[in-house]
Image (spheres, helix red, strand yellow):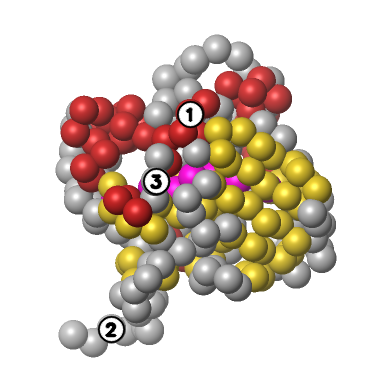
Amino acid sequence: MTFVVPAAPVVSLPVVGSTERFPVRRVYCVGRNYEEHAKEMGFTGREPPFFFLKPADAVVPVPAGETGSMPYPPLTKNLHHEIELVAAIGKGGRDIKAADALAHIWGYAVGLDMTRRDLQGEMKKQGRPWEIGKAFDQSAPTGPLVPAAQAGDIQNAAIWLQVNGADRQRSNVAKLIWNLAETIEHLSAAWELQPGDLIFTGTPEGVNAVVAGDLLVGGVDGLPELRVRIA
Ligand code: MN
């Protein structure tokens, strides 16, 4: 087949201990999925999970042991970090029940759901879509994937982020309002999941601004840490 314009390359993530890579199809994100983060954003209580997407090519793959680079994006004066556990779907499906959901996960990575908070806030206020705040270019730096069986007790793992060596976010995956299995049940009721889909599962409290030159180092116990410099 030939195309009338150049076809976009497949975005992919490195896999720990392998030369093979994970091809990214879609990037789903869960909003306000840790209680203390929901509170800092002005919300309380357990609301049904809600989702937004980023384009696959917003993913910036960062190999293990390397420091990735993310340019400070245009239009914002308030670029926020959100450290998140990322689940990678290996087996697709629709209407997946929570009891079966974990079998659909190929592996896990650490990701940053970078957010132009000022633009997101303006869109919220006006009842408009979030894309300009969430789905911008290079908004999802992501570390290498670890196969699920090698990731340890990921549902009870510490999750944390430091900026220039100082703690900003520190919590535990156990504090997810909607856990991995429940998230997949809800998500797959709305979209048919496919191999290659990534799910950013939400961020704990402590989100805050970064500026050009900052070094972000984040982790989830059991996975390689993610290092990103804001250029
Ligand atoms: Mn997020």
Q: Are marks 1 and 2 in contact (CB under 8 Å)?
A: no
Is most of the magenta stretch helix, strand or loop? strand
Q: What element does badge 1 sit on?
A: helix
Confirm whether the magenta stretch covers residue 146: no
Instruction: Provide the secondary structure element on which disc 2 rests.
Output: loop
In this rendering, the answer to whether 144 lies above or below 222 is: below
Q: Magenta stretch?
A: 81-89
Residue at mark 3: C-beta within 8 A of ligand 1 = no
Element marked by disc 3: loop
Q: Counting residues from the N terminus, which is met first, the one under dot 1 or under dot 2? A: 2
Between the C-alphas of marks 3 and 2, the distance is 44 Å
Disc 3 to disc 2: CB gap under 8 Å: no
Image vertical order of residue 206 relative to residue 216, above or below? above
Give the camera-side residue of 6 and 167: 167
> Which residue is located at x 24 percent, y 54 percent?
90
Q: Quadrant of the N terminus?
A: bottom left
Task: Look at discs 1 and 2 and give the one toward the viewer.
Answer: 1
Q: Could you tell me how far apart the alpha carbons at marks 1 and 3 are, in whole angstroms?
A: 14 Å
Which residue is denoted by mark 1 in the rendering?
Answer: 174
The residue tagged 3 is 152
* Circle 2 residue: 3
Tell me if residue 85 is in the magenta stretch. Answer: yes
